[in-house]
Amino acid sequence: MTKLRTLILAAGLSFASAAMAHADGTVTGAWKLSIGTNDAPCTLTFTADTVGNAGPAVPSSDCENGLASISHWKAVGPTLQLYSSSDELVAWLKPKGDAYAGSRISDGRQLALNR
């Protein structure tokens, strides 16, 4: 029974470490954010806080259609959440290869976040 608990604890710690490494190692920096497939992307730049799984997000001046309201991000497991300055959830994105895809909360439109 002790070996089983140790194995479960090790697996849980390994998963948590991998999720945090994914968030900090791949999320920070400049990304191209677009709505749907035909919209021209704008740039969204992520910076990590001291913990590394959240921080400010700065949209470029060409971010339109409500994307300029994004002010910070948070990694929750493998997903990425984008928030407005009033802490409203703007979008929830899931990893898709080296990118993220999801939908905007306000209207359900598809969003893509690519390097």
Image: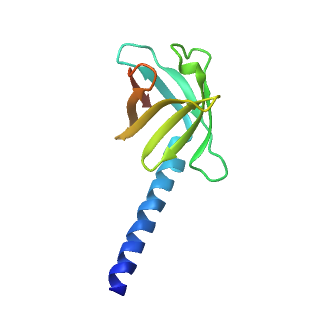
Q: Vertically, is 62 above or below 86?
A: above
Where does the image place residue 59, in percent across and percent down from the top left?
A: 60, 24
Name the outermost residue toward the right: 50
**61 versus 84 height, above or below:** above
Q: Residue at x 45, y 14 (%)?
A: 40
Where the N terminus falls, by quadrant? bottom left
Q: Position of residue 23 (x, y in %)?
A: 50, 48
Colour mapping used in the image: rainbow
Using residue 40 as the reference point, say whether residue 97 is left or right of it: left
99 over 64 or under it: above or below? below
Q: Which residue is painted at 51% across and 42% down in the image?
A: 27
The number of callouts visible is 0
Residue at point 44%, 50% (across, down): 77
Q: Considering depth in this image, is 102 or 96 the residue closer to the camera?
A: 102
Residue 100: quarter of image: top left
Q: Position of residue 19 (x, y in %)?
A: 45, 54
Residue depicted at x 44% and y 30%: 113
Can you name the residue that lies furthest to the bottom here?
Answer: 2
Q: Nearer the viewer, residue 16 or 62?
A: 16
Specify whether residue 115 is in view.
no
- Is 26 above or below relative to 114? below
Q: Is residue 49 visible?
A: yes
Where residue 79 appears, as percent x and y from the top left, is: 43, 43
